[in-house]
Structure formats: structure tokens, C-alpha cells
């Protein structure tokens, strides 16, 4: 079973909750799909057994020995990436989308496409099973392809090691990396917080989850920050058919556990939050789709 | 015009909190300011202000429409497409455009030798301009649900900035990939907001490396100071990175923020601290003020 934890808004507690889920059962495969800001490795210090190079697209680079400065590529580029500066055609690495069109239409064959090869996928073991995570190199396009690779690797690892549960810690937002994280999973857990931003982003997240027709569970984290906002979220969920799996209060112990490189359930198994997380996890695991 | 981007690697560290409070403080000190919410996947800044709608534009890109009567199923468009957005089964005479995957680059139109490809606009999101306190001052980038990348909508929002003077505050998306780069690239200075936790520090390091690589000036605000440990301060000291402000962790701040209220409105001291941060940035980086 694949379970994805996502949130829309960042910083609601996805990774802390994923870390707790990953240390409750016996063996799990834990996949960190937040390839733009992977953090779970900080808690679990996995032993790397495999490192795979990930090519995140290409960038166009001009060979000035061949370029005649005709400017044809400027007219064809739809990403405003190519411009004429002081009689020299320049490609902005930041704006280039890697579509190859300029390299195809250049009459002098003066444009080369260079692969972005600085991103990595890692897999290995951690104290409660196997771990897979991706690290996107800064500035590269987070297209979701690396997330797909992480998930493929996680599935393969689960199969090879006879592990039944895969936990996917998702990225923030609702774009391609999130879509790649949730497509085809068995269950989605949405972590929100009772703030005006949390509510707004949660609605957009539910929108994307519904688009893919996935069973969703909601956790209201830091629920005591604003009780009445929490009620608004509950009401909205009831009206929209989203199951509330549980609510967790704010506590500094979450940060203390993180500093000790432990999940909350490892750091203090009998704490109120740990007990609540155990109940939530059971509910999510056991409920039929 | 001087543009300050508010960014962070890790989500939820307080980017929007800082951006909205800086904007409010500037406005209430009669300094011309524009706030642009560039977090198009999760735009939240406008909710903190009593705004009036000014104008809205739809952001689109062009996707191909294939005329199967003219198409010879030669496969050249499929070969040119670098995004796997053209699905083709020549024996069954099937050719489809997967619009969600298309980046709108136009390569397929160029590839087609049979004039079988035309184009139509595909909606990506909206850029909405609002006025606040009777001045044209808030711009929101909002990507449509189901769209893959927010970059086009972010670019369009930044293009909507009409003023030439004053200060523009860009509320950046999280992370260090394309959406973040698109936002900070447009700025004269970047304020990184972090929190004093291991996750906060790890993502801060990544943001710092990225900003150094693209030669941006930046400083750091530590939000929720006192919550975790002192490793972030030690890192800033070691790397000689300016610590602009520490905002202490207080439950009251979290409560106020949760209701959509601005702390600088009820706590003038906090407003003054933010104003001092901006004034210092301007003093030290004022030369680039007239760059554009």
C-alpha cells in the first residue's frame, strides 16, 4: 500500500508526521518526494547503497565560434530566454525551458543542448526499513520526473524486500511534483493547520486530490492555534466528504525530537501527540477504500 | 524601483508573514509599495488585506491542435516534442495532444511539414491586481488547479508591476527550483526567512548556495527564534551572512496570523523593526535602485 502525505501550504508538519508514521510499524519503505527540499534524511541518516544520476532536462548553450548572430533563435523561443545584447545573442540559463527548438532551427548548428546532470536519487536502509530520496540540484526544473523515479525505486525496493507499506512524504504546493506524488497511490493524507492560509491551501489541495479521485484523510496539525478556524476546516471537510483522521496540538516537543534526529514517536512514545498519531495511523491503515 | 524578494527553501517558515507585514509597514509609513504574491501554487497574501479588485488577466500558452485530415502520421512532431505531449499510434491513425504535458514551446508546429498543426490558447492561471488604501498595490499570481508549472503565471505577475518608483515586495514560492529562481532573479535583494530547526537550517543552506551561484545579495530573518537550537546563528556567523532580524517564537503571533491579522498593525514595535530592516537594505544596496 502506498500512502502519500501532502499539504499545499508548506511547514504544516508533513515531514514530522511522515517520520512518525515511518517508525510506528515494522519495516516500511520511506520515500521523500520533496526533492526540492528533502529533509527526512536528517532524521534517519540512511546508509546510502545506491546513487543514481538524474538528468533534469537540458539547457541550450551557444557555440560562439559558429554563431553568426542572425537572431533566428530569438524569434522562435517562446520562453523569452534568448536576447540580443550588444550584438551578441545570449541565452538565459534561468529562462531556458530545454525544449530543443532553437538547436533544431539554428542554420549554423551553433546551439548545443547540455544535460542538467547534478540531481541525484539515493536509496539505502534506515533503522525502520528502506529509504529512497531525491535531491534536485538548485535552480533545476522540478518536473515531477524525479519524483516518479523515487516512487519507482520505492516500489521496486518494497517488492525486493517484501515490504507492504510505502510512505511518500510529499512536496508543498499543487503543481507537477505533487501530482506525481499522488497519482495512483492508495491513500492521501493531507496535513493542514488552522490558519487562513492553511484553509485556503487545503481547499486547493483537496481540489487536486479530487481530480484524481483518491481517498483522502485530513489531519489538522497545531489545532490549538485557532480553535474556531479548526471548526471551519472540520465543517468544510464534512460538506466535501473528506474524512478527518485526527487533530494534533502544537507542542515544542516536535522540534526537540527533530533536533535529536528522532521522530516524535521514537523520542517520546507515550506523549499525547505520539498516542494521537498512533490512533490516526491505525485509522488510515485499516479503513477500507 | 527597488525589488525585495522574500524567500525560503523550507515551506511554512513565515515568508508570507514577513512579506505582508513589510508591505503593511511601508504603506503605513507613506512609502510607495507593491506586494506581488509569486507563490502561484498556494497564494495567500491578499487574504491579509482589505482590497478592491482592479483588473484580472488570464495567463495562457499555446498548445497544438492537430488536423487529422492533413496529418500523415510521419512522426516528426512527436520527435520534436521534448515533453512527451504528443501521443501517436500510426497504424491506427491515432494522434493526440496531451495538453497537461505541453509546455507551449511551439516545436511541433515548426516540425510539421504538412500544415496540419494549428494552435489554441490553454489556460494556466490568472494574474489579479488589487488596490489597497486607494493605491494600485497588490498583484497575485494564481495557477489553475491541475496545471504542472507555475513559472508562466509568476512571470506574467511580475510583468504586471506598473510602478517605476518605491519598493516592490515579492513573496516567493518555497524551494530552490525554477519557480523560486524566476522570482528572485527579478529582485535586487533577497530576504531568506528561516526557522532555527534542523530542517530550517538544511533548506537555508541550499537557498544560500543557490543565491551565491546567481550572485544575489541576501540576508536572513530567523522566525520563531528560541523554538529550536542556535545552529542557524552559528552557520550565519561562520558564513558571514547578515542576520537582519530575529522574530521570537510567541503563540500570540501564531494566533494573530491564523486569523489573517497583521502583527505590525497591533504591535508598532514589530513594524518599526521591519522598517529598519528595509531601510538598512536600501542604505547598503541603494545603488542598484536606478538600475531599471
Image: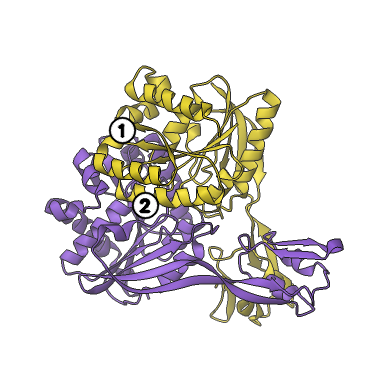
Q: Nearer the viewer, residue B279 or B174?
A: B174
Q: Position of residue B209 (x, y in %)?
A: 46, 49
Say which element carries label 2. Answer: helix
The quadrant in which the N terminus of chain B is found is: bottom left
Give the color of chain A as drawn.
Answer: yellow
Residue density around tag 2, few if under 14, some if 14–19, many if 20 or more, within 10 Å: some
Residue density around tag 1, few if under 14, some if 14–19, many if 20 or more, within 10 Å: many
Q: Which chain is purple?
A: B
The quadrant in which the C terminus of chain B is found is: bottom left
* Badge number at residue A25: none
What chain letter is assigned to the residue under label 2? Answer: A
Q: Position of residue B253 (x, y in %)?
A: 21, 44
Q: Quadrant of residue B2?
A: bottom left
Query: Which residue is at a point 36% across and 40% down the rendered structure image?
Result: B235
Q: Nearer the viewer, residue B211 or A134?
A: A134
Q: Check the image and report above or below for A242 versus B104.
A: above
B45 horizontally vs B114: left or right:
left
Q: Quadrant of residue B46?
A: bottom left
Query: Which residue is at a point 51% across and 49% down the rendered structure image?
Result: A210
Q: Position of residue B85 (x, y in %)?
A: 68, 61
Residue occupied by mark 1: B228
A90 horizontally vs B205: left or right:
right
Q: CA distance from mark 1 to mark 2?
A: 28 Å
Check whether the beta carbons of the residues at disc 1 and disc 2 lie within 8 A of each other. Answer: no
B75 horizontally vs B292: left or right:
right
Q: Residue furthest top?
A: A270
Residue occupied by mark 2: A200
Q: Is residue B242 at all visible to an observer of this figure?
A: no
What chain letter is assigned to the residue under label 1? Answer: B
Say which element carries label 1. Answer: loop
Amino acid at each position: 500500500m502506498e500512502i502519500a502525505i501532502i499539504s499545499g501550504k508548506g511547514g504544516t508538519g508533513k515531514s514530522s508526521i511522515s517520520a512518525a508514521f515511518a517508525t510506528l510499524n515494522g519495516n516500511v519503505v520511506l520515500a521523500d518526494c520533496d526533492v526540492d527540499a528533502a529533509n527526512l534524511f536528517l532524521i534517519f541518516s540512511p546508509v546510502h547503497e545506491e546513487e543514481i544520476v538524474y538528468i533534469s532536462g537540458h539547457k541550450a548553450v551557444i557555440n560562439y565560434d559558429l554563431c553568426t548572430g542572425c537572431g533566428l533563435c530569438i524569434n522562435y523561443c517562446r520562453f523569452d530566454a534568448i536576447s540580443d545584447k550588444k550584438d551578441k545573442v545570449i541565452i538565459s540559463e534561468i529562462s531556458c525551458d530545454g525544449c530543443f527548438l532553437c538547436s533544431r532551427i539554428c542554420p549554423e548548428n551553433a546551439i548545443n543542448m547540455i544535460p542538467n546532470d547534478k540531481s541525484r536519487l539515493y536509496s539505502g536502509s534506515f533503522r525502520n526499513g528502506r529509504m529512497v530520496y531525491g535531491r534536485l540540484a538548485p535552480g533545476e526544473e522540478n518536473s515531477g520526473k524525479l519524483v516518479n523515479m523515487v516512487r519507482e525505486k520505492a516500489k521496486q525496493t518494497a517488492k525486493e524486500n517484501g515490504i507492504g507499506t510505502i510512505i511518500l512524504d510529499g512536496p508543498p504546493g499543487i503543481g507537477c511534483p505533487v501530482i506525481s506524488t499522488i497519482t495512483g497511490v492508495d491513500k492521501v493524507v493531507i496535513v493542514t493547520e488552522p490558519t487562513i492560509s492553511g484553509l485556503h491551501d487545503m481547499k486547493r489541495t483537496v481540489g487536486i486530490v479530487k481530480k484524481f479521485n483518491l481517498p483522502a484523510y485530513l489531519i489538522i496539525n497545531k489545532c490549538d492555534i485557532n480553535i474556531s478556524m479548526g471548526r471551519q476546516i472540520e465543517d468544510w471537510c464534512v460538506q466535501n466528504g473528506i474524512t478527518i483522521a485526527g487533530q494534533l496540538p502544537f507542542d515544542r516537543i516536535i522540534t526537540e525530537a527533530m533536533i535529536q534526529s528522532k521522530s516524535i514517536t521514537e523520542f517520546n512514545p507515550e506523549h499525547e501527540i505520539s498516542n494521537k498519531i498512533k490512533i490516526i495511523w491505525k485509522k488510515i491503515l485499516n479503513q477500507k477504500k | 524601483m527597488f525589488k525585495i524578494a522574500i524567500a525560503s527553501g523550507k515551506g511554512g517558515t513565515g515568508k508570507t508573514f514577513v512579506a505582508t507585514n513589510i508591505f503593511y509597514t511601508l504603506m503605513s509609513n507613506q512609502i510607495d509599495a507593491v506586494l506581488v504574491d509569486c507563490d502561484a501554487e498556494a497564494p495567500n497574501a491578499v487574504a491579509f488585506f482589505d482590497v478592491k479588485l482592479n483588473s484580472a488577466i488570464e495567463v495562457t500558452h499555446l498548445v497544438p491542435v492537430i488536423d487529422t485530415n492533413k496529418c500523415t502520421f510521419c512522426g516528426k512532431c512527436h520527435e520534436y516534442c521534448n515533453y512527451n505531449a504528443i501521443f501517436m499510434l500510426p497504424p491506427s491513425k491515432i494522434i493526440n495532444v496531451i495538453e497537461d504535458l505541453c509546455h507551449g514551446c511551439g516545436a511541433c508546429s515548426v516540425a510539421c511539414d504538412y500544415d496540419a498543426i494549428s494552435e489554441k490558447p490553454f489556460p494556466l492561471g490568472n494574474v489579479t491586481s488589487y488596490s489597497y488604501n486607494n493605491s494600485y498595490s497588490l498583484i497575485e499570481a494564481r495557477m489553475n488547479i491541475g496545471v504542472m508549472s507555475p513559472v508562466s503565471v509568476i512571470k506574467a505577475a511580475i510583468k504586471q508591476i506598473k510602478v517605476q518608483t518605491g519598493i516592490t515586495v515579492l513573496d516567493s514560492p518555497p524551494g530552490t527550483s525554477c519557480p523560486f529562481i524566476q522570482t528572485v532573479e527579478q529582485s535586487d535583494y533577497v530576504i531568506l526567512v528561516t526557522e532555527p530547526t534542523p530542517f530550517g537550517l538544511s533548506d537555508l543552506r541550499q537557498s544560500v548556495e543557490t543565491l551565491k551561484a546567481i550572485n544575489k545579495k541576501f540576508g536572513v530573518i530567523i522566525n520563531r527564534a528560541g523554538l529550536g537550537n542556535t545552529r542557524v546563528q552559528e552557520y550565519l556567523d561562520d558564513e558571514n551572512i547578515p542576520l537582519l532580524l530575529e522574530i521570537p517564537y510567541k503563540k500570540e503571533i501564531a494566533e494573530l496570523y491564523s486569523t489573517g491579522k497583521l502583527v505590525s498593525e497591533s504591535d508598532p514595535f514589530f513594524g518599526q523593526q521591519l522598517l529598519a530592516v528595509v531601510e538598512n537594505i536600501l542604505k547598503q544596496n541603494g545603488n542598484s535602485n536606478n538600475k531599471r
